[in-house]
Image: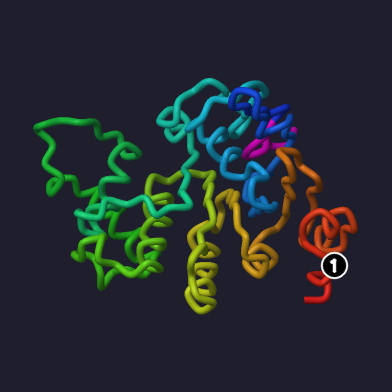
């Protein structure tokens, strides 16, 4: 029997009043796959992430995570089942140090709950796990720096670290290289490739060089529906995708 996919979206719909944003999205993403979702502005990409991660409830349809139907669960319950998500806008604790941002993110995954009696300094496993992630994201020299004074690229690296710190097997990254220079973007791609090894990555990204350089498969979302899914070569060669989104000039880029 084949393993259950990391994510399976079945007939996923989302409406806000009379505005229909997602229109029966069908998508299956295998475990260990790096999958990019692309599409024009207003296609519904961030809304799709919001529904998958339970930030917004689906109007209809279902989401299965590692073979388990998680439809109707809240964000924390889904996170505990192995899904973690970053956002377009950097989402960190600016008044905490880099290390404390990471340490806070690992506590629930290690089984700790809120308690007056648990002093963070005594939690050796949390310190060690946070230290491992700190090394993975290359911010060791910024360990005691307040997160709010990091450069933009460093803050995005920290957010990726927060996303992976809890040990999730499925990671949703929403425009991880947005606002970066080419050199910063290249460094971010190398970091993402390293920290997602052995995990399932689903990303929304507008930079096509990032998408085609990192993704195993790509889905094109247009007007709330999946127009096409395939390998980078298949998507690049698709006449339908060229007409709807990429443009013919991109095939020669």
Part of the protein shown in magenta: 1-9
Q: Which residue is mark 1?
A: 248
Q: In front: 114, or 179? A: 179
The answer to whether residue 208 is left or right of residue 227 is left
* Horizontal and vertical percent position of residue 93: 27, 51
Asked whether residue 3 is drawn in magenta, I would say: yes
Residue ID at (53%, 47%):
172
Q: In front: 147, or 224? A: 224
* Horizontal and vertical percent position of residue 18: 65, 24
Residue ID at (62%, 60%):
206
Rendering quarter of residue 211: bottom right
Kindly give the residue lying farthest to the bottom in the view shown.
183
Q: In front: 70, or 128? A: 70
* Horizontal and vertical percent position of residue 42: 64, 46
The answer to whether residue 231 is left or right of residue 37 is right
Residue ID at (25%, 60%):
148
Q: Tell me how the rendering is colored.
A: rainbow
Residue ID at (38%, 45%):
166
Q: Quadrant of the C terminus?
A: bottom right
């Amino acid at each position: 029997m084949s393993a259950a996919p990391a994510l399976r979206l079945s007939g996923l719909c989302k409406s806000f009043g009379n505005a229909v944003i997602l229109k029966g999205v069908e998508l299956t993403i295998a475990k260990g796959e790096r999958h990019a979702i692309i599409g024009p502005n207003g296609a519904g990409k961030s809304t799709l992430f919001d529904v998958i991660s339970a930030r917004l409830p689906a109007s209809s349809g279902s989401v299965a995570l590692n073979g388990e139907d998680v439809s109707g669960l809240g964000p924390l319950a889904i996170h505990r089942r192995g899904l973690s998500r970053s956002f377009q806008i950097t989402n960190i604790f600016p008044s905490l140090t880099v290390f404390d941002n990471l340490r806070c993110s690992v506590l629930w995954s290690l089984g700790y709950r809120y308690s007056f009696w648990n002093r963070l300094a005594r939690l050796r496993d949390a310190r060690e796990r946070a230290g491992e992630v700190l090394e993975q994201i290359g911010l060791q020299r910024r360990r005691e720096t307040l997160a709010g004074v990091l450069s933009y690229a460093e803050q995005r690296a920290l957010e990726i670290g927060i996303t992976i710190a809890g040990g999730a097997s499925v990671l949703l990254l929403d425009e991880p290289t947005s606002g970066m220079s080419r050199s910063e973007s290249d460094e971010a791609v190398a970091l993402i490739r390293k920290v997602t090894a052995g995990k399932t990555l689903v990303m929304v990204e507008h930079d096509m060089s990032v998408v085609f350089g990192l993704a195993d498969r790509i889905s094109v979302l247009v007007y709330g529906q999946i127009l096409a899914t395939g390998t980078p070569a298949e998507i690049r060669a698709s006449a339908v995708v060229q007409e709807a989104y990429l443009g013919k000039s991109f095939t020669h880029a």
